[in-house]
Image (cartoon, rainbow, N blue to C red):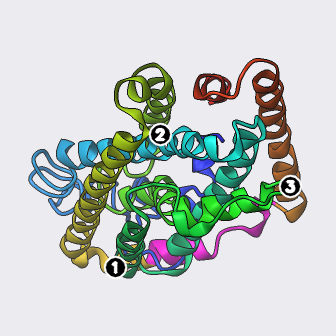
Amino acid sequence: MTDAPQNLFPVAAAGPNAEVRSGNAGQSTGTLGGPGTLEDSGSLGGSGSLGGSGSLGGSGTLWAFTLTTFLSALLLFSIQPMFAKMVLPVLGGAPSVWAVAMFFFQAALLVGYCYAHALITFVPTRISGFIHLALCLLAFVALPIQVPLWFGEPPATGEPYLWQIGLFAVAVGLPFIAVAANAPLFQAWFAGTGHKHATDPYFLYAASNLGSLIALLAYPFALEPAYGVSALAGFWTVGFGLLVASIALLFWLVMSANEQRSRAARLVDQGAADQGTADPALRPTWTKRLAWIGLAFVPSALLTAFTTHVTTDVASAPLLWVLPLALYL
């Protein structure tokens, strides 16, 4: 499970419904960020405005997006060893538990990215925020994280792989997908704030990787030995609540930027139109896309195979799960 695909949906592909996206924000003339334009006139990037100090485009917005991205990655990668450890005794400590868990989490991550891509591309920002917040609130029905007793026992005969996938989907599917969608969604939202760094929001990827690495290394060395999985499930629920509140704050920042940029509506619409009429030759072909997907299977399969080999020979434990995954990141 890697955090690297969180840049699968660049902000430039946000699509035509981008009333807060600055498609030509970095050009020199007749755009949102050029000299002698709206940036200098005190609306998008000037002092005392969206891009000025102490405003929606200032350091407060930058830190809000950075810290929320960090918290999201922290929760995304802490839930994986935590819930796998909960399921491990149910399946007799089998080494296959983590391999199946990796399969599920990677598939769920892809679902989260596809969901975020659909919101960015086809849904206006003023609506997509409410949709995502609704999904996050719906995810509370699965919290706190636990193995649901009503799901039943694993099959007495045969391999329990499908049973385990179903258990993971029921117990952590909704919260995981809601958190997984945040990274590409936040990048697109940040591009709509009018911040001076809005045209290059990929520094958020660094915050995401940092949160992922801390979560993976802290779990076996500090969190589980100190608190145990039951207490950590409660902490995760609190963290998820803070994350939802932070997402609401980010959405408010984007919508506030949208209102203050209403005078630039024509320019923004023109920028969105320019995006929609981009040269088709610049778009990757389906052959390249399928090649990327196929190549992505290689390191993922090697990671799963290596971890399964080590845990089969030594022991199936979170420490041996997360170290290869941390190196993989």
Looking at the rendered structure, the kind of residue marked 1 is: Arg
Q: Position of residue 163 (x, y in %)?
A: 73, 61
Q: Residue at x 9, y 53 (%)?
A: 48
Q: Earlier in the sequence, mark 2 or mark 1?
A: 2
Q: Nearer the viewer, residue 3 or 290?
A: 3
Where does residue 154 sit, x and y in percent of width and height? 72, 58
Residue 224 location (% of width, % of height): 43, 29
Q: CA distance from mark 2 to mark 3?
A: 33 Å
Prevailing secondary structure of the magenta residues: helix
Residue bearing mark 2? 78
Q: Are marks 2 and 3 in contact (CB under 8 Å)?
A: no
| Mark nearer the N terminus (2 vs 3) | 2
Q: Residue at x 51, y 60 (%)?
A: 181
- Check contact, mark 1 vs mark 3: CB within 8 A: no
Q: Secondary structure at mark 2?
A: helix
| Disc number for residue 288 | 3
Q: Which mark is residue 220?
A: none
Q: Which residues are magenta?
A: 270-284
Spatial CA span between label 2 and label 1: 31 Å
The nearer-to-camera label among 2 and 1 is 2
Q: Amino acid at mark 3?
A: Lys
Q: Secondary structure at mark 3?
A: helix
Quadrant housing the N terminus: top right
Q: How many other residues sit within 10 Å of disc 2, few (<14), some (14-19) or many (≥20)?
A: many
240 left or right of 170? left
Q: Quadrant of residue 132?
A: bottom left
Q: Badge 1 is on which residue?
A: 126
Q: From the viewer's perspective, is residue 311 above or below residue 148?
A: above
- In the image, what residue type sits under mark 2? Ser
Q: Secondary structure at mark 1?
A: helix
- Can residue 31 be seen by looking at this rendering? yes
